[in-house]
Amino acid sequence: MGYGMSRMEEEYSEHEDQNNGGSNSQVNNEFLNTHNDIFHMTQIRSGPSESLRKSIVDGPEIVDRMDSRAYVSQFSADGSLFVAGFQGSHIRIYDVDKGWKVHRDIHARSLRWTISDASLSPDQQFLVYSSLAPIIHIVNVGTAAKQSYANITDIHDGLDFSQHEDVRYTFGIFSVKFSSDGRELVAGSNDDSIYVYDLVANKLTLRLPAHHSDVNTVAFADETGHLIYSGSDDNLCKVWDRRCLSTEEPAGVLTGHLHGITHIDSRGDGRCFISNGKDQAIKMWDIRKMTSNADSYEDRTSNWDYRYSRYPQQYKQLKHPHDQSIATYRGHSVLRTLIRCYFSPAYSTGQKYIYTGSYDSSVCIYDVVSGSQVAKLKGYHQLAIRDCSWHPFDPMLVSSSWDGRVAKWSRSSCQQEETSDLD
């Protein structure tokens, strides 16, 4: 499950700084020797490396503070808008170019527990959001009105994902994403399934019984929309090719995580993606290494629940015997909630970094090629940072936390702990 609903943060507020012991990352040397084009292209695209302190060093500056947990946040593709979703039924869209003024204040409809995800359409005209219910809501955010109430001041429709012949009971949605053309949505749910919704035809077009546990995260692999990545609490990442789904079998399976996957981010090339896991690690994958089936593995850590306790020390040295990942990045903390990870922007960094929120109230940044943790943004938030977003063009990163704060880290305002240089 993605959320601990029965305990508040006061009951488990211990941070993980003393438990991590610094970053502990590795790159698969065998892969580097034989298939190193991903790392090689990353170095070429990023150009001469400079200290991260020359890009994101100052901050934080407060963007907003609400009286409920911030769960999701993202910049628009052009960086002009920023979306933040809060547990207390609010989704706010900020106009970045106009001093971060609130562009839209959306009051979520039929919310169950929290805003679990939100996604802005490529043309920035529509926003979809999900909660732990089978309804995804779509809001027209391209109009002039600042306030948006359900079907009163604006279009605010519910898309019912339970209207499928195979659905027998209600479920919740953890993840939703627009396709690159804005015509479709892909969603992952706690009925172990992947859904695809055609917005043009206004109907559900696909339900895949994809995993053996909650599907916490889904993503389109690239702009074609043919490939979908999924990650689940069954510890597996899967690749789905929509051109050949007659048998409802994945195109491939990738094993390596010891616990459930909380988030997936695609590199956008149809080959490489990263996943964040409850085993306190980010893994990078090349789908050319995937297999048709998951290798059998006796799980020796199944009694641990990330919602209620720290990661046991004895588990930190465990490694999956059939790990297919090409790199592993450690040093952050994944507890209590589905913490997210991303590649840094292609335009400004050449996707040279991976960054993630952390339960210890920080943002961790890793070098893709070396695997080292190159920066840790901390000292401001009081509770877990579930999501964060790097501006696509400017040296600016925004963190959103369970303390209700949305904060901007940039050149002009910080207390940053830099663990090493990028050179």
Image (cartoon, grey):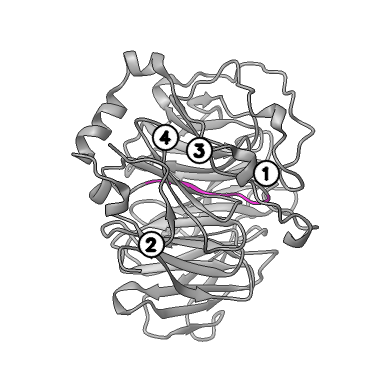
State the image coordinates of residue 307 (x, y, percent, origin top left). Answer: 73, 48
Identify the residue at image location x=48%, y=72%: 139
Dot 3 corresponds to which residue? 275
Highlighted magenta segment, given as a residue range: 336-343
Mark 2–mark 1 Cα distance, whole angstroms, equals 36 Å
Disc 3 versus disc 4: distance between alpha carbons? 17 Å
CB atoms at circles 1 and 4 under 8 Å apart? Answer: no
Tell me which amino acid carries mark 4. Ser
- Report which residue position mark 2 lands on: 75
Helix, strand or loop for the magenta stretch, by majority: loop
Please tell me which of labels 1 and 3 falls first in the chain: 1
Q: Residue at x 48, y 48 (%)?
A: 356
Q: Callout 1: few (<14), some (14-19), or many (20+) C-alpha neighbours within 10 Å?
A: few
- 105 on left or right of 423: right
Residue type at numbered disc 2: Phe
Horizontal relation, residue 197 to residue 212: left or right: left
Closer to us: 267 or 386? 386
